[in-house]
Image (tube, rainbow, N blue to C red):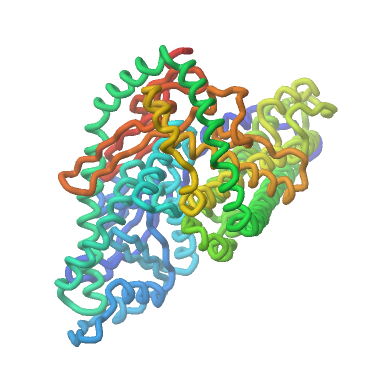
Amino acid sequence: MGTTVFAPDIHWSLLLQKLPRVREHRGHLTQLGGHPPRWQPIFCVLRGDGRLEWFSLREEYENGGHPLGSMTLTGYTVLTSQREYLHLLDTLCPVSSGDHTQEEPDPLLEMPVTFPLFLQHPFRRHLCFSAASREAQRAWRLALQGGIRLRGTVLQRSKAPAARAFLDAVRLYRQHQGHFGGDDVTLGSDAEVLTGVLMRELLPALRAQTLPGLRGAGRHRAWAWIELLDAVHAAVLAGASAGLRAFQPEKDELLTVLEKTIRPDVDQILRQRERLAGRLRVQVQGPLESCLCRKVDTQLSLVTQKLLSTMEAVLSAVQTLLAQGMDRLSRHLRGSSSGTWLRKEVYSFGEMPWDPELMQTCYREAERSQGRLGQLVVPFGFSGTRSLMFGAQDLAQQLMADSVATFLQLADECLTTALNCTQAAQQLEKVRGRVLKVRSAGGGGHGSGPGCSAGHWTSHVCVLQKFQSDSSSAQREFIRGWLLCIFLPFVLSQREWSCKVDLLELEGDVLAVGSPALTLEGIYEDIVQGVLLQRINGELKKALRVSDVSCTLDGCSAAPWDQTGVGEHLISSWAILLNCWGAGDLLWGVRDGSKCGFLGGTAYTLHPDPEGWPSYGEQGQWGASVCLSHRGTL
């Protein structure tokens, strides 16, 4: 076996490029549906974009027929306990003491489900399925959870500044409505997020006006309530999607005007902002420090430690899984001379990040801490632990994907036709060590092997940082970002200290500038965020036992205000002005236009870009997806 020549026609990195980014899942299930409801067999398909479809027969799917039904999975939760789901239905419409309506027979109770899959949503109709075996139930549960996460974090995963600006705008709107605590409302596309915000505002009125008039009793009444919410949600989502699309021309016009306003005055705006920030910081510093000492510091340390232990467990699981995959590939290479068989193994290795069963060992570590973390952050009004868990799972998947790509690319360059299988396996061992080895991007002293010179390897280190170096940086940024999400809204909501700050004294100076790119509110929040980031960086330094964690978050300085690179700090956000749901209009305005006007001294404009920022609407409709495009240097 050792003398067998290594297969000459396997291009490892090219194989990786052909791998599916998301694994489609399909199979037979039974579904509770129809009027009256009954269990009926279907063929179900989970698409790669997180859309679930079901057909009456497998042949209809294979022949390209139209599905019986479909649903995007944004905001859903998977339950595999029939008792838990029935309890949820009972809590939706609790029976009042004076209600003696006779409850009708319930098909869910008449036919106990052995391997159920219940998909529950706060505003959309529920989906009730049953699998044929425990193994099938588990496979579907993992696939559905992956689809739910994929749909939910589409904006959080986006690197486009427009996506971040949109999320900031939603947060600002909700703060103006008095809601400072973070939650899971920002899961989904732009239209889905706006719909979730509006549905939460409508829910109290809907309950008061419609629940008393619903007919039926018990769970039949709960089903009627769910159907009503689903109809309202569909109408709101359609209106939000249409409003976003209709706003596109007006937005382009606003941005053109904004650019013309900012371009000639950018230097003056930056100087004025620096001067106002210095004056405002004098007022803010004392009361803010007192608030942080009394209400934040103790819990900040506990939450930091919990986030750190969670991410260490997640990343350790990723590294273990990655090492096992590379070892398995090396063993297979030593034991086989078949090029076709080896292609299959390389394909399986490259598919690891999108294998829900394999990645579950990593995802489970994030899920385990959800309960305890939720208890720690409740006093600060934060209820977005599901978003946080999704973020940790996304990070695990991304790091795994990056490491797999690095390994396969380096293997492709190091393995040559001159090697036999044993020598090729030895080269894979060297690549394995390089992928997992802790070393900074600029480190030297790299060994070399046949087909992989030291200089060639160093060039790859500069581009593809190795797993532990990459994961350490990602871990710090993840923890810093979520600590800011947890504590910043709480600190901003503390009126006892913020009321001591006299903003009116500086309001006239801001108005005198006459630019929408400069607002006192934006400067005020940046200062508070900078002071809080100092605290967060201090906790991270202690927890990680490192000398420097001064990297910034989304352009925010760790110091309250740093005059160096001042243009990059004039990054605030859009503001969205949302009307209460009436004629379906969604009014947008620019609060602090630096993100959509200029960034770091460079001018930008916004344009539709579905590929740059995925935004899934109903029936395949796209919302007003946007990204920033370069327009030239100011």
Q: Is residue 249 left or right of residue 421?
A: left
Q: Is residue 450 left or right of residue 343?
A: right
Q: In terms of image quadrants, where is residue 108?
A: bottom left
Q: Locate the N terminus and report the quarter of the image it occupies.
A: top right
Count of labels in the image: 0
Q: Furthest-front residue in view?
A: 505
Q: Of residues 81 and 173, which is closer to you in this image?
A: 173
Residue 404 in the image: x percent, y percent? 63, 39
Q: Of residues 566 and 134, which is closer to you in this image?
A: 566
Q: Is residue 567 above or below residue 121?
A: above
Q: Is residue 115 visible?
A: yes
Residue 428 in the image: x percent, y percent? 75, 37
Residue 232 in the image: x percent, y percent? 21, 55
Q: Is residue 480 left or right of residue 225?
A: right
Q: Is residue 421 visible?
A: no
Q: Is residue 401 above or below residue 363?
A: above
Report the residue at 57% width, 55% height from top.
363
Q: In terms of image quadrants, where is residue 37?
A: bottom left
Report the residue at 60% width, 52% height from top.
290
Q: Of residues 321 and 485, which is closer to you in this image?
A: 485
Residue 265 in the image: x percent, y percent? 42, 15
Q: Of residues 432 and 528, which is closer to you in this image?
A: 528
Report the residue at 48% width, 57% height from top.
382
